[in-house]
Image: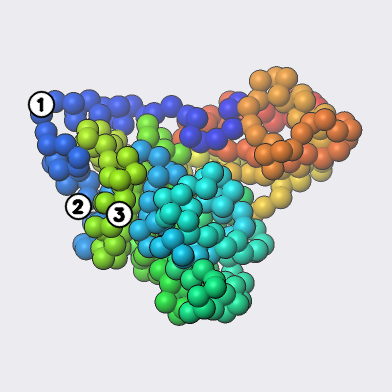
Amino acid sequence: MFFASDNTSGVPAQILEGLSRANDDFVAGYGNDPVNLALRDRIRALFDAPEAEVFLVATGSAANALAIASYCPPWGAVFCHELAHINVDECGAPEFFSNGAKLVPVAGAQAKLTPQALEQALTRAGKGGVHQVQPALVSLTNLSECGTRYTVDELRAVCAVAHAHGLPVHLDGARFANALVAEGCSPAEYSWQAGVDVLSLGGTKNGLMGVEAVVMFDPAQAWEFQLRRKRGGHLLSKNRYLAAQMLAWLDDDLWLALARHANQMAAQLQDGLNQHKDARILFERGGNMLFVDLPRSCHRALQDAGAKYYLWPDHASLDCPPDMAVTGRLVTSWCTTDAHIKEFLRILGAAL
C-alpha cells in the first residue's frame, strides 16, 4: 500500500533490458552516440516536431530549472500558479540556475492558471520600468501539483495570453504521460500545437530509473541550454544510459501503457473512497493523484497497517482531535495493483 509517490516505484523489465543493450562496446560520450540520436529522432517523430531539440538530464528539478533559465535572464519574471511545483517544491532551483530570476505566483482554482488571471497578472506587471523585474516566461504544470489536468483547450487559451504578451511558455510535464492518456490527444496537440515552447518531459515518475527530457520546440534557445546544462554539472558523460532508458520507455508505447495503468488504479481508488461519506476528495482527478480529507483516526489506522502516503500540505500533522479532517495525498504508479487498492479500502472501511 505504497501511495507516497509514483517516483518510489521500481523499474519495468523493459527499461532494464534497454540499459543492458546500451552496455555493449564503446561509444562517444556526452550524448554524441547512436542511442541519443535515435532517441532525438523518436521524440521528434512522436511530437511531429522535426526541428525540436532534445536534451537529457537525470532529475526533474534540473529539467525545469535549466529550461526556465534558458529563457529567463536574472532580471526576468516567471509567471506560474502559486501551487506550481517550481514554486513550492524546487528549493529555489529556478531562481538559482537563472542567477536570480523571480517567480511570480498567480492564484487559480484547481491549481491551474486561467487566461483571465494570467492576463491580469501580466497587465499589472507591465514592461519597461527599470525598477521592476521584466516578464520573461510563463510556466505551467500538467498534471498540476494537486493532480488536476489542463484540457487541450485550457492549455491553448493560457498559452495564447502568454504569447500575446510576447512570452514563451514552459510546461512542467513530470506527469505529462498521465495527463496525455487521460486527455486522449496526441503529444503534439498537448504541447507545441497548443502553444508550448519548451517541455520538461518526465520519465522518472512513470517507470524510468532516472531521466527527464527537455524538448525545445523552438530550437533558438538550444545552444544556451547546452551551455547551462554543462556549466550546471548536469551533462552526463555516459549519457547513453539516460537515452537507453527513455528509448525503451517509448518502444511499443510502453510509456503510455504505464501511465494508463497508474490512472486506472487511481480511478479504482477514487471509486472506493466515494463509497464513504466521511472521505471527501478535494480536487478533480486529472490522472493518478488524489487528495482526500479523512478523519485523523482513519489516517492512524491506515498508517498503523503499513499504508505509506503523505499528508498535505507538508506541514500537516495528525496531532489533532480524532474526528478532525486531515488531507492525505495518494499517488498510484505503474506497479500499483488491485490488491493494494482493495487492502487500503478494507482498512479504511473498518476504521470508518
Q: Quadrant of the C terminus?
A: top right
Q: Are the residues at dot 3 and dot 1 in contact (C-beta closer than 8 Å)?
A: no
Give the residue type at disc 3.
Phe
Q: Amino acid at mark 1?
A: Asp
- Mark identifier at residue 25: 1
Q: CA distance from mark 2 to mark 1?
A: 22 Å
* Residue 185 image-quadrant placement: bottom left
Q: Residue at x 77, y 24 (%)?
A: 301
Residue that mark 2 sits on: 41
Residue that carries the numbered disc 3 in the rendered image = 225
First in sequence: mark 3 vs mark 2: 2
Sooner in the amino-acid sequence: mark 2 or mark 1: 1
Task: Between residue 337 and residue 304, name the one nearer to us.
Answer: 304
Foreground tag (3 vs 2) = 3
Query: Is 80 located above or below residue 179 in the figure?
Result: below
Coordinates of residue 344 in the picture (x, y in percent): 67, 28
